[in-house]
Image (cartoon, rainbow, N blue to C red):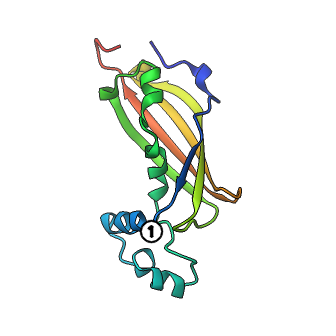
Amino acid sequence: MPIDTGLIGKTMPELVMTIEAGRLQLFAEATGQTDPVYLDREAAKAAGHPDLPVPPTFLFAIELEQPDPFAFLAELGVDLRSVLHGEQAFTYHSVAHAGDTLVAKTRIADVYTKKGGALEFIVKVTEISKDDGTAVAEMTNVVVMRNLPGSK
């Protein structure tokens, strides 16, 4: 059974996350950041930042803060074994820093199929802002479901 295109426009529960410096440092190290601005508070302040800046792609982690980040797929009856991460894109508007509280608002922007229904796609768009309303980034995430013979 194909994913219902009536889901386009559906919103997810809002997520709120306060950014911790230690978590930013661990992420920066794990992703191979070598710029000391991402690893050392003094270097960040010397570069004009109020605290450690959020490294590129860290904002993806905000979606994983909820108890079950894939619950929306399970509610659709999607077999999680068939899910692939298709694409991730970021449009940045401002820099977030350690200590900032971020708010993520996610909606389903598109649902479509390819290859005669063998592949289904859900496009999620997440707008991330600081708790004062300052836009930080827009994140687009494409989830792919493979419909194998005998599945569903």
Is 10 positioned to the left or the right of 123 in the image?
right
Residue at image location 38% in from the left, 69% down from the top: 25
Residue 14 vs 148, above or below: the answer is below
- Helix, strand or loop status at disc 1: helix
Residue 50 placement (x, y as % from top left):
58, 77
Q: How many marks?
A: 1
48 and 78: which one is in front?
A: 48
Quadrant housing the N terminus: top left
Residue at image location 44% in from the left, 29% down from the top: 71
**Residue furthest bottom as drawn:** 46
Is 65 positioned to the left or the right of 83 in the image?
right
Evaluate whether residue 120 shows in this view.
no
According to the picture, the residue beneath numbered tag 1 turns out to be 21
104 and 16: which one is in front?
A: 16
Residue 104 placement (x, y as % from top left):
58, 47
Residue at image location 47% in from the left, 20% down from the top: 76
**Residue furthest right as drawn:** 133
Query: What amino acid type should be assigned to the residue bearing mark 1?
Result: Ala
Residue 47 vs 134, above or below: the answer is below
Quadrant housing the C terminus: top left
Residue at image location 54% in from the left, 45% down from the top: 140
Evaluate whether residue 19 shows in this view.
yes
Quarter of image, res 24: bottom left
Residue 112 placement (x, y as % from top left):
52, 26
Residue 84 placement (x, y as % from top left):
35, 36
Quarter of image, res 133: bottom right
Residue 149 vs 28, above or below: the answer is above
Q: Callout 1: 10 Å neighbours few (<14), some, many (20+)?
A: many
